[in-house]
Image (cartoon, coloured by chain):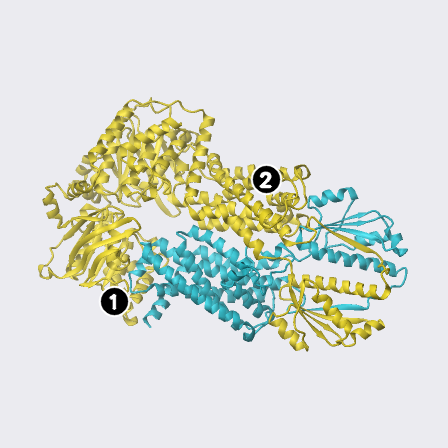
Chain colours: A cyan, B yellow
């Protein structure tokens, strides 16, 4: 009872302190508004203004038709180049695609000789290369088909695919990006705020002051974890409702109550990580550097993204976690973000319920408890040597 | 330095420093108010006054560390407002800022610190070695030459600071509180040293600020300051005569304007009542604390009786604070026993804590909470019942005179008020004992005496036991009993009068010194001899030929390079980040994200269940991209399994699939994709289309024979990376990113750290130029970044197996140009930020965003429009990316890529030039 009251009062003190720290308040505001907006809207379309060049040696109606079929937003208006320029331009990275239409192409098509068009793709640009080449193939065949249909009848392809994208019918990237940013912000803020709360006390010399009072290290740590978790929880709830659902108009499938229950468990673990890092670092700057080295891998490997949004570097897929192929996969099972990202995606994107996400919820609870106990032991030890 | 030998100014000639209406304000606070003053040359001048009256501001202006806001300052005949004249004057001035070792580098050894300053002043090797040896001998630091400055005692730090200041034979030596917090013996040695140096160089003017009035009494000439104004100037006897007092302490109070003296009451010590004599409040028996090999407190024993005022006298770092912490239960003792109220101190016993009030050294309350909130939170934590809190807070506010400032933030209050608040907080739960760790350091004499009046009242009226530590002799004299402490040991413990009498000393200070001398292993005589050796050496100076200016520039530049490298090599976190950070991140990216979308799980709803429909599903399951899961039975199951994330896509083959195809009737295959990750979903769709097309073609071949051609074929050549694999594509993209991120953060930190720790003052007051400073600091980071580059390339080629198809030399040269630009970018950022945390975020975020968004990492620069395009065209990362892709994937050499080198090479001079332009050579 006494302990609970102390935890409560110390936590209120943390909230007051945070309110008076302009840098951290700015960071919270930035991470939950501007950052989410820009990161979500800046998620590149898979194919957006891809630079393409055409070597047109045919100069026929058909080749002209093909050239005109490439236009924004998928492609830039094609650059008309000569065969000699092609290699140099691709070497310099000016074009991702170069389409070579040979002379006599239209004549050969009409004669049914099935001539070949060469498509050169700069495969170092993973984000455009694979999907873009498929687009180009489709566009070229459609144009050729249309052109030929004007001249002779052609059979419809008998079997076609009808795609239905579940949970995000338009495959709108903002849906994905905005929610992933919220998830990232939750993790980042809770580690930064809890860690900073401890380091601030240490730099101001107030920890020993508190310790001279009838208060235990457990109460100190628990108060910091709950207060910062509360701030992150409130901030992310506001952000998810006002920014994501409001401004960005992203629909959310699942139960928000269930989601935030998981967030609480996650914050328990990440807050403990923040305390742990703060006991390792001797100063705020060291804490900042440690943060980089811990947060980036944790975020990237769990698929949450982070400063370098991994998905943007390539065709967009993320590693499937089921395989557990490498030692890193096994290590990552201990990171709360791994489970939290799976949990959040299942609920927010696919509307999954408790019957689906309970394993993640259990993992988060277990990891949170282990981390808290470990950090508390470490915190006690640090306090003893801090003087 | 060539000036030095010739200028022997006779005393009473032109003043060394001439101030005319000098004013300085920090936002709304006036630090100096139109000061007009001449400081005589060749004298030892003391500036006296409590903390925060403007002494340090005045000194930093005279030293050229701070830019002049108003008025004019002439030092040694030169105008400090004129940059050119100031540059010429700086080698003749030495400045030791306030704070123990503030301008020193804690991780560098004693020798390395002095050596850095010697190099900064362009001294050659022989001259340097001779001077350093002389100075270290003279100050008695020679045996500790290898010890890191951070591990020296306060007195030794100040001696080291003096060595660094004297290395270039200044004509004006400015010492800002050089002896505050230093033990009396070291203090005496320090002043003896200064005396000897002055004897050898009589023309040198020494300007000293001090809080110890006893010291000031020995100076030639004094300036008394208060609230940014000069109260009085003159020789010490002149000041005493003017105030009509016996001591300078009293003289200072008498000289204060009447308003400040209002309510001042001299401290009167009422004798302690004898009746409680024997009851013990605190007892320490053989108390010992070891931190590793270092023994901070060494078998300390004493007893404090209830209601007694017990003083702990000793220098900074002698173990006072550690002893107090052991007594409060904050630190478990390594050995020995501590008893409070007859019970052994137990760190887990929260009940004892409620009987003790503890006031830590320096202000340690929550500066972000108001006075009232501070009182309330402590009342709550000490378990005062909710109903009683308001009354108790009110009572404390009245008793400690806080009622007028209840809603103010502590930061806005004068030091004296903050100390009263600390005391109120420590007393809020009516403790029977108060432990006060240096409660009055830095407080002005008036407030200090007021504070003591409260303490005495607590002890005598409320019978509170007071355990107080101090380094002021006059405060120690007010205690009932004191313990003299040095180097972790209690030298003697008794009443002040008895200690003085036992030693037959004139006063407590002399008694303390006598005890210290007895305790020291190294006799002061040897120090004196060494100082004599110094004056002998100085009498016959061997002037070294000054190096030519260009060489001196290089000397200065490399002195910073050397120092930065040494510091970096001793900071494990920064060094690890610098050397291995990039590798670590690349490994994580390489192993962690596999951007090839593979092993997609799918399930089939086969409503036809014919040979053909099974063949269609087999076609998919046979590919390396897809893995088949058990079939589904209905739409609800598709939905459920997609939702659970068990499958990524589901196919529905309609009834009559085989029949309709055979008839040529159009058939639709339903494909459900998990759209949660749009990027992956699109890739899945592309795969699906490809597989479908493939199946159709093979079916067509089966039925029509091999010679059924399409209208036209498209031959796709994936160049540079024929397998369209992610690692070969990722490596050349990630190298520019990593070589930007970490070098920029580190080079930003290198400058901002100095700003935060205070050693930036060495840039302000020494002749190094801004460009020399920046380049000197940049070199180690460029070297580290190049090592990083080599490791990254090695990792890519040998571990990831990504071949480097083009010229390595071309790549390495581009990398060098690039890291020169990225570290220069970090230095440029450092001009804008003040704190290291801000520096990390600014360099990280400001640096990375343009690289990721505009340099062609994701979308080619040619796809961008507007501002993004403009930034992308100029950004060094765009050009370096072209080169990394060109050399890694495209097999290109220098000649193929030369167009990219020109803009890359231009980035460095532009960025470093801007950095030098924006960096300030003085504090503002």
Q: Secondary structure at mark 1?
A: helix
Q: Is residue B366 visible?
A: no
Residue drawn at 29 percent across, 54 percent down? B418
Q: Of label 2 and label 1, which has the lower sequence position?
A: 1
Q: Is residue B468 visible?
A: yes
Quarter residue B372 falls in: bottom left
Vertical arrangement, residue A217 with respect to residue B867, above or below:
below
In the rendered image, which quarter contains the N terminus of chain A?
bottom left
Residue drawn at 28 percent across, 32 percent down? B137
Checking the image for residue B351, the label placed there is: 1
Position of residue B859 measured from the top left corner of the image (x, y, whole percent): 65, 52
- Disc 2 and disc 1 on one polypeptide chain: yes
In the picture provided, is B582 more to the left or to the right than B608? left
In the picture of the structure, the residue carrying the numbered disc 2 is B812
Tell me which chain the residue with mark 1 is part of. B
Quarter residue B199 falls in: top left
Q: Which of label 2 and label 1 is nearer to you?
A: 2
Vertical arrangement, residue B464 with respect to residue B750, above or below:
below
In the rendered image, which quarter contains the C terminus of chain A?
bottom left
Proximity of marks 2 and 1: CB atoms separated by less than 8 Å: no
Q: Nearer the viewer, residue B867 or B763?
A: B763
Position of residue B708 measured from the top left corner of the image (x, y, whole percent): 86, 61
Checking the image for residue B707, the label placed there is: none
Position of residue A142 measured from the top left corner of the image (x, y, whole percent): 81, 60
In the picture provided, is B179 more to the left or to the right than B72? left
Tell me which chain the residue with mark 2 is part of. B
Q: Nearer the viewer, residue B530 or B66?
A: B530
Vertical arrangement, residue A186 with respect to residue B818, above or below:
below
| Label 2 to label 1: alpha-carbon separation | 67 Å
In the picture provided, is A353 more to the left or to the right than B2? right
């Amino acid at each position: 009872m006494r302990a609970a009251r102390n935890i409560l009062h110390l936590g209120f003190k943390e909230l007051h302190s945070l309110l008076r720290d302009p840098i951290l308040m700015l960071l919270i505001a930035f991470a939950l508004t501007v950052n989410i907006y820009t990161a979500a809207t800046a998620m590149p379309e898979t194919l957006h203004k891809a630079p393409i060049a055409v070597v047109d040696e045919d100069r026929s109606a058909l080749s002209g038709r093909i050239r005109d079929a490439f236009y924004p937003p998928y492609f830039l208006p094609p650059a008309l180049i000569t065969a000699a320029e092609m290699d140099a331009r691709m070497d310099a990275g000016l074009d991702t695609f170069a389409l070579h239409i040979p002379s006599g192409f239209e004549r050969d098509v009409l004669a049914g000789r099935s001539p070949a068009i060469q498509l050169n793709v700069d495969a170092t640009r993973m984000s455009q290369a694979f999907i873009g080449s498929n687009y180009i193939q489709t566009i070229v065949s459609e144009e050729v088909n249309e052109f030929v249909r004007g001249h002779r009848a052609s059979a419809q392809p008998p079997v076609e695919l009808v795609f239905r994208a579940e949970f995000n019918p338009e495959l709108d990237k903002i849906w994905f990006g905005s929610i992933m940013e919220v998830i990232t912000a939750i993790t980042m803020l809770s580690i930064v705020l809890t860690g900073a709360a401890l380091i601030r006390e240490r730099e101001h010399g107030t920890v020993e002051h508190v310790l001279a009072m009838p208060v235990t290290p457990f109460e100190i740590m628990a108060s910091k974890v709950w207060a910062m978790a509360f701030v992150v929880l409130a901030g992310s709830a506001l952000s998810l409702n006002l920014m994501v659902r409001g401004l960005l108009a992203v629909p959310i499938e699942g139960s928000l109550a269930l989601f935030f229950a998981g967030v609480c468990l996650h914050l328990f673990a990440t807050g403990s990580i923040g305390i742990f890092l703060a006991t390792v670092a001797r100063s705020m700057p060291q804490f900042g550097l440690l943060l980089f080295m811990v947060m980036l891998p944790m975020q990237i490997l769990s698929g949450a993204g982070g400063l370098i949004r991994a998905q943007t570097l390539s065709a967009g897929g993320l590693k499937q976690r089921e395989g557990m192929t490498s030692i890193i996969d096994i290590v990552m099972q201990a990171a709360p973000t791994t489970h939290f990202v799976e949990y959040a995606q299942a609920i927010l994107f696919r509307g999954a319920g408790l019957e689906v996400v309970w394993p993640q919820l259990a993992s988060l609870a277990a990891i949170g408890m282990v981390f808290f106990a470990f950090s508390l032991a470490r915190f006690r030890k640090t306090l003893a040597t801090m003087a | 330095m060539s000036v030095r030998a010739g200028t022997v100014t006779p005393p009473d000639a032109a003043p060394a420093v001439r101030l005319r209406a000098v004013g300085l304000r920090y936002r709304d606070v006036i630090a100096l108010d139109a000061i007009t003053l001449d400081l005589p040359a060749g004298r030892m001048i003391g500036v006296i006054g409590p903390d925060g009256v403007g002494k340090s501001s005045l000194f930093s202006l005279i030293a050229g560390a701070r830019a002049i806001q108003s008025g004019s300052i002439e030092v040694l005949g030169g105008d400090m407002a004129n940059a050119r004249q100031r540059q010429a004057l700086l080698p003749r001035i030495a400045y030791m800022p306030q704070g123990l070792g503030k301008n020193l580098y804690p991780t560098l050894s004693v020798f390395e610190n002095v050596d850095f300053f010697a190099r900064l002043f362009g001294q050659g090797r022989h001259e340097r070695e001779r001077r350093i040896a002389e100075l270290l001998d003279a100050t008695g630091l020679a045996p500790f030459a290898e010890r890191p400055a951070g591990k020296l005692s306060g007195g030794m730090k100040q001696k080291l600071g003096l060595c660094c200041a004297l290395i270039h034979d200044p004509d004006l030596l400015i010492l800002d509180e050089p002896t505050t917090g230093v033990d009396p013996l070291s203090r005496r040695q320090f002043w003896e040293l200064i005396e000897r140096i002055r004897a050898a160089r009589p023309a040198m003017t020494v300007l000293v600020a001090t809080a110890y009035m006893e010291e000031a009494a020995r100076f030639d000439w004094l300036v008394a300051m208060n609230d940014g104004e000069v109260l009085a100037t003159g020789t010490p006897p002149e000041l005493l005569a003017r105030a009509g007092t016996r001591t300078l302490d009293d003289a200072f109070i008498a000289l204060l304007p009447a308003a400040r003296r209002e309510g001042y009451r001299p401290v009167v010590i009422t004798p302690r009542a004898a009746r409680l004599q024997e009851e013990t409040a605190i007892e320490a028996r053989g108390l010992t604390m070891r931190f590793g090999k270092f023994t901070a407190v060494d078998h300390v024993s004493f007893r404090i009786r209830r209601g007694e005022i017990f003083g702990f006298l000793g220098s900074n770092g002698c173990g006072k604070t550690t002893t107090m912490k052991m007594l409060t239960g904050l630190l478990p003792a390594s050995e020995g026993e501590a008893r409070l109220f007859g019970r052994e101190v137990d760190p887990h016993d929260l009940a004892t804590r409620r009987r003790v009030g503890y006031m830590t050294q320096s202000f340690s309350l929550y500066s972000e909470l108001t006075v009232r909130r501070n009182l309330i939170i402590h009342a709550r934590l000490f378990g005062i019942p909710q109903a009683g809190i308001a009354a108790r807070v009110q009572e404390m506010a009245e008793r400690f005179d806080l009622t007028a400032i209840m809603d103010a933030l502590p930061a806005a209050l004068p030091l004296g008020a903050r100390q009263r608040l600390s005391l109120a907080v420590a007393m809020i739960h009516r403790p029977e004992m108060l432990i006060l760790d240096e409660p009055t350091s830095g407080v002005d004499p008036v407030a200090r005496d007021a504070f003591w009046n409260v303490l005495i009242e607590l002890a005598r009226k409320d019978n509170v036991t007071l355990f107080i530590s101090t380094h002021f002799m006059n405060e120690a004299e007010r205690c009932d009993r004191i313990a003299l402490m040095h180097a972790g040991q209690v030298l003697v413990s008794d009443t002040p009068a008895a200690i003085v009498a036992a030693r037959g000393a004139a006063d407590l200070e002399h008694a303390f010194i006598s005890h210290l001398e007895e305790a020291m292993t190294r006799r002061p005589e040897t120090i004196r001899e060494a100082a004599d050796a110094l004056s002998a050496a100085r009498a016959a100076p061997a002037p070294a030929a000054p190096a030519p200016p260009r060489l001196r520039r290089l000397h200065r530049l490399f002195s910073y390079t050397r120092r930065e490298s040494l510091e970096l090599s001793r900071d494990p976190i920064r060094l690890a980040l610098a050397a291995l950070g990039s590798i670590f991140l690349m490994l994580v990216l390489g192993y962690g994200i596999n951007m090839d979308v593979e092993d997609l799980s799918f399930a089939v709803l086969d409503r036809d269940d014919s040979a053909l429909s099974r063949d269609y599903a087999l076609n998919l399951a046979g590919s390396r991209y897809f893995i088949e899961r058990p079939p589904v039975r209905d739409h609800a199951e598709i939905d459920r399994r997609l939702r659970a994330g068990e499958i990524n896509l589901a196919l529905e083959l309609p009834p009559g699939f085989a029949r309709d195809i055979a008839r040529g009737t159009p058939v639709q295959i339903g494909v459900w994709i998990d759209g949660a990750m749009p990027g992956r979903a699109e890739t899945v769709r592309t795969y699906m289309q490809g597989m479908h097309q493939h199946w159709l073609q093979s079916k067509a071949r089966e039925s029509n024979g091999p010679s059924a051609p399409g209208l036209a074929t498209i031959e796709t050549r994936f160049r540079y990376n024929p397998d369209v694999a992610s690692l070969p594509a990722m490596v050349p993209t990630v190298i520019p990113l990593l070589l930007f991120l970490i070098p920029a953060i580190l080079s930003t930190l290198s400058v901002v750290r100095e700003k935060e720790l205070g050693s930036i003052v060495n840039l302000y007051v020494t002749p190094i130029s801004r460009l020399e400073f920046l380049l000197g600091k940049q070199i180690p980071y460029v070297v580290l970044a190049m090592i990083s580059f080599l490791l990254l390339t090695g990792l890519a080629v040998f571990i990831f197996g990504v071949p480097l198809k083009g010229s390595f030399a071309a790549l390495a040269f581009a990398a060098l140009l690039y890291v020169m630009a990225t570290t220069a970018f970090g230095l440029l950022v450092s001009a804008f930020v003040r704190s290291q945390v801000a520096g990390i975020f600014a360099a990280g975020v400001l640096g990375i965003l343009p690289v990721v968004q505009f340099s062609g990492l994701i979308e080619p620069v040619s796809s961008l429009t507007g501002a993004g395009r403009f930034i992308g065209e100029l950004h060094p990362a765009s050009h370096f990316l072209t080169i990394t892709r060109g050399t890694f994937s495209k097999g290109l050499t220098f000649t193929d890529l030369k167009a990219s080198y020109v803009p890359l090479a231009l980035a460095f001079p532009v960025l470093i030039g801007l950095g030098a332009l924006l960096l300030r050579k003085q504090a503002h």
